[in-house]
Image: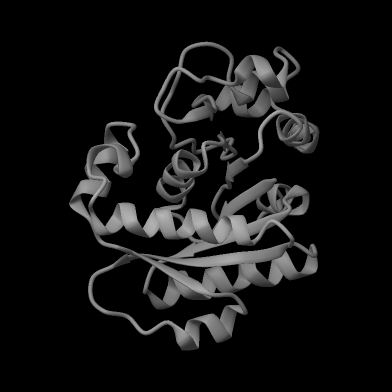
């Protein structure tokens, strides 16, 4: 199953959500942000190489870390040499090998956002409790509807206090999973590790376990 993690506004924690969800689902996480990669770097071929025709998709899969990952390069030359139109074939190739393919989508509403959504079986929309972020997330939700991509869950990230989510679920048309503000989660991400590995009893780890359970329920979308 191809599950695209999107959100519209940058800085809402899409990469953190994708990485930790990949750990929970034991899937492969694809850093699909060709211009602003944020997931851990690994040695060997990366997504830029694959999209430029220099490497096969499976050659870019790195299983050496705590999360199986297809990293993306960080150079402007690599991004320019990539052909985003081939991303669909890459994701479908990975989908034939891995039960879960989690795509960390770029921010914004450009064509490079629509492509991971169009090939996805379902999407997760990540946002924070901020008016601008919620507005952008709703725009991405509308784009997913246009592309006929089912919305699995809304992830309300960096929640500091108890937060009622009924109105938000009604707006987006999908249940909401909240991820609390967490120093442990931030530290884990900086070190390229899932929070469930370093703080398995933390509320953040519990939230990603809940999200993974929800993803299994979305396989029919």
Q: Quadrant of residue 214?
A: bottom right
Residue at image x 62%, y 61%?
A: 217
The x, y position of residue 5, in whole percent, is 56, 52
Residue at image x 52%, y 43%?
A: 25
Q: Quadrant of residue 29?
A: top right
Residue at image x 41%, y 78%?
A: 131
Left or right, 73 with reference to 197: right
- Asked whether the viewer can see residue 148, the reply is yes
The x, y position of residue 160, in whole percent, is 23, 70
The x, y position of residue 62, in whole percent, is 53, 19
Q: Toward the viewer: 186 or 76?
A: 186
The x, y position of residue 197, in whole percent, is 30, 37
Q: Quadrant of the C terminus?
A: bottom right
Q: Is residue 25 above or below residue 192?
A: below
Q: Quadrant of residue 94?
A: top right
- Asked whether the viewer can see residue 11, the reply is no
Q: Is residue 27 above or below residue 174?
A: above
Q: Toward the viewer: 217 or 39?
A: 217
Left or right, 108 with reference to 23: right
Q: Quadrant of the N terminus?
A: top right
Q: Toward the viewer: 31 or 75?
A: 31
């Amino acid at each position: 199953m191809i599950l695209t993690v999107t959100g519209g506004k940058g800085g809402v924690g899409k990469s953190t959500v994708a990485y930790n969800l990949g750990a929970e689902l034991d899937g492969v996480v694809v850093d699909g942000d060709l211009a602003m990669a944020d997931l851990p770097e690994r040695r060997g071929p990366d997504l830029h190489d694959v999209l430029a025709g220099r490497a096969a998709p499976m050659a870019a899969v790195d299983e050496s870390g705590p999360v199986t990952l297809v990293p993306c390069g960080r150079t402007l030359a690599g991004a320019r040499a990539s052909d985003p139109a081939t991303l669909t074939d890459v994701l479908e190739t990975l989908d034939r090998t891995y039960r879960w393919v989690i795509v960390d989508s770029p921010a914004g509403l450009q064509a490079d956002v629509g492509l991971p959504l169009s090939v996805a079986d379902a999407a997760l929309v990540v946002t924070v409790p901020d008016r601008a972020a919620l507005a952008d997330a709703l725009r991405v939700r509308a784009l997913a509807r246009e592309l006929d991509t089912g919305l699995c869950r809304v992830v309300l990230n960096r929640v500091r206090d108890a937060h009622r989510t009924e109105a938000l679920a009604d707006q987006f048309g999908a249940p909401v999973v909240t991820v609390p503000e967490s120093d442990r989660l931030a530290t884990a991400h900086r070190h390229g590790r899932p929070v469930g590995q370093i703080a398995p009893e933390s509320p953040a780890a519990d939230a990603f376990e809940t999200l993974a359970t929800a993803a299994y329920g979305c396989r029919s979308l």
